[in-house]
Amino acid sequence: MSDTFKTAPGQARNVAAMTTTTRHSRHLGISIDRPAQEVYDYVSDPANVPGWAPGLARSLELVDGRWVGESPMGRVVVDFTPRNDFGVLDHDVTLPSGETVHNPMRVLTDGPGCEVVFTLRRRPWMSDEDFHRDAEAVTADLTALKRLMERA
């Protein structure tokens, strides 16, 4: 097994050199028995967030072209990746502290259904307990999404 990987045609990077700058991430996924496009259409509409992701925002409204919400952490601003053909649902959340957290998220086709995958990144100051609690909140939101979509 090589310790390099391709980043672009003709380029390679040393994995060992890169791991020192990588933060700990956890990929949290859930299978949903609905077509990927249907799930993507629902999740990509910011107005639907409070219905399935109260861990992000209990309410969300468009204010001066930006989505602003009330979350368990206080008032947040959420910037969503534009709709796309790749199932990408990345979003940046600006916390009350001013810190912006990038949240990679995908809807992946899986036969007649799909899988929704959220990458939770551990922020430098987070304790193991904080990171675990964050993972539980994301898992609860994904479970709520599954219930909601499979009821439809």
Image: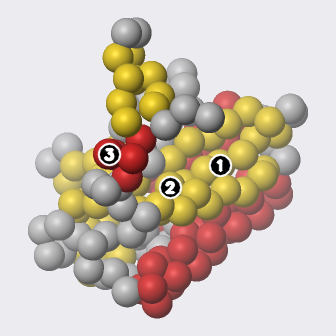
Question: At 87% across and 33% down in the image, what residue appears?
Answer: 112
Residue closer to the observer: 18 or 147: 18
When asked about the image quadrant of residue 39, the answer is top right
Task: Determine whether, in the image, residue 11 is placed left or right of residue 131.
Answer: left
First in residue order: circle 3 vs circle 1: 3
Which of disc 2 and disc 3 is earlier in sequence?
3
- Report x, y in % for residue 137: 54, 77
In this picture, is 110 found above or below 93? above
Circle number at residue 119:
2
Question: In the displayed structure, would residue 95 be above or below residue 63?
Answer: below
Q: Residues within 10 Å of mark 2 (few under 14, many from 20)?
A: some
- Crowding at mark 1 (Cα within 10 Å: few <14, some 14-19, many 20+): many
Q: Is residue 146 visible?
A: yes
Q: Residue 116 shows which numbered tag?
A: 1
In the rendered structure, are the residues bearing label 3 and label 1 in contact, judged by CB atoms less than 8 Å apart? no
Question: What residue does disc 3 label?
Answer: 17
Q: What type is the residue that disc 3 sits on? A: Ala
Q: Position of residue 49 (x, y in %)?
A: 49, 58
Front position in the image: 17 or 118: 17
